[in-house]
Image (cartoon, helix red, strand yellow):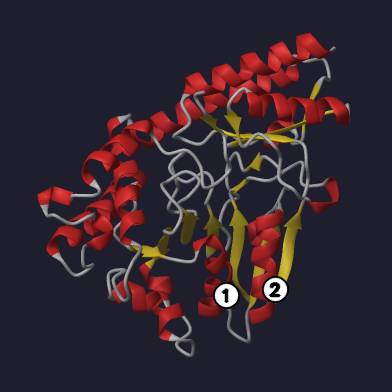
Amino acid sequence: MKKLNFNPGPSALPAEVIKTAQESMFNYEDSGLSVVELSHRAPLYEDIHFQAMNRVRSLLEVPDDFEILFLQGGASLQFAMLPMNFLTPEKKGAYVLTGSWSEKAYQEAERVGSVYTIASSQDSEYRTIPEVDLSSCSEDTAYVHVTSNNTIFGTQWQQLPLKGNAPVFVDASSDIFSQEINWDNVDVVYAGAQKNAGPSGITVVIMKKSLMKDGNKDIPKILSYDTHAKGESLYHTPPTGSIYLLGLVMKWIEDNGGVKAMNVAANEKAALLYNVIDESNGFYVGHSDKDSRSLMNVTFRISDEVLEKKFIKEADEAGFIGIKGHRSVGGCRASIYNAVPKEHVETLATFMKEFQNNNQ
């Protein structure tokens, strides 16, 4: 049976990327070595490394005054690294809480220094994106942290809040490369690759160079962004296989119209599922408010708990992978990242309609 991958991460890779990897990853350029056996100092690997970086810069139109880093530890390590580098004793970190991952970022920063919440939608069970005026930050704010898309609750900023006086750090793990970025409005964008940019094991960090130079010098070198920038993300052995696959995904995005085309496709795919929810007369109930809906993670419930369990079971039997909602909130979720074909989403929408017709 063909499997249709709607996993929230690690998630689907483009079929073309998998095919290319099968053909070339395990005897790269007829070297007799797989990519994961190459020395990270070898010219063959350096080509992989810097081509991937250059493609990231080109696709996102990253200005020259931003550094691109390939790091490890996922977004979760960034939750700690950012405050370790930029949260000084006389400053505070400001956090916008929109879901579980922003909460975790806040909690890590809290272990490093002083933090405060500038806006939150926790009271609404994270059904919406809160209104926030970043110009209202206190003068002692070191930075503002925002999570652009919330995989668990299925909400997304339709447009990031306008930058105030403090630098803006954005966790874009689940929607990077699905929309353009206004670089005048942000100072750091970071993303674990395993949702929308490649496999697990690699984290993309894009940071304003001037900010990096002012980072805390009293932390371990391995946790300093400046260390990795000076070493061109080769300070220690990088996750070579993950970077190779990320580079293939970047090329796939290029070949398929770039970030703008990904955004068009994301809107089309999301509309297929939200239309089923909205037209179901309450059979399916979306978690997020309509003006805060995610294009990446469509979350919904079936009001009858028995039917919901039946839906998840039958979806699994029909070959849909990853439909069960996050363990912390339950329900159902379809993650429809860049690599998920529109045809797969159409098949899921048809399945949802048929399930409703058969169970009303």
Where in the figure is residue 171, as x and y percent of width and height? 55, 56
Three-letter residue code for mark 1:
Pro
Quarter location, residue 70:
bottom left
Q: Is residue 324 visible?
A: yes
Going 70% across and 24% down the picture, which residue do you hit? 314
Where in the figure is residue 268, as x and y percent of width and height? 53, 22
In the picture, measured across the screen, residue 149 lies left or right of residue 312, that is left
Q: Which mark is residue 242?
A: none
Q: Residue furthest bottom?
A: 218
Q: In this view of the protein, which residue sits in the foreground, 187 or 261?
A: 261
Q: Which residue is mark 1?
A: 83
CB atoms of marks 2 and 1 within 8 Å: yes
Where in the figure is residue 38, as x and y percent of width and height? 21, 63
Quarter location, residue 360:
top right
Cα–Cα gap, marks 2 and 1: 10 Å
In the picture, measured across the screen, residue 175 lies left or right of residue 91, that is left
Could you tell me which secondary element the residue under label 1 belongs to? helix
Q: In this view of the protein, which residue sits in the foreground, 11 or 189?
A: 11
Q: Which mark is residue 115?
A: 2
In the picture, measured across the screen, residue 267 lies left or right of residue 33, that is right
Three-letter residue code for mark 2:
Val
Q: Residue furthest front?
A: 1
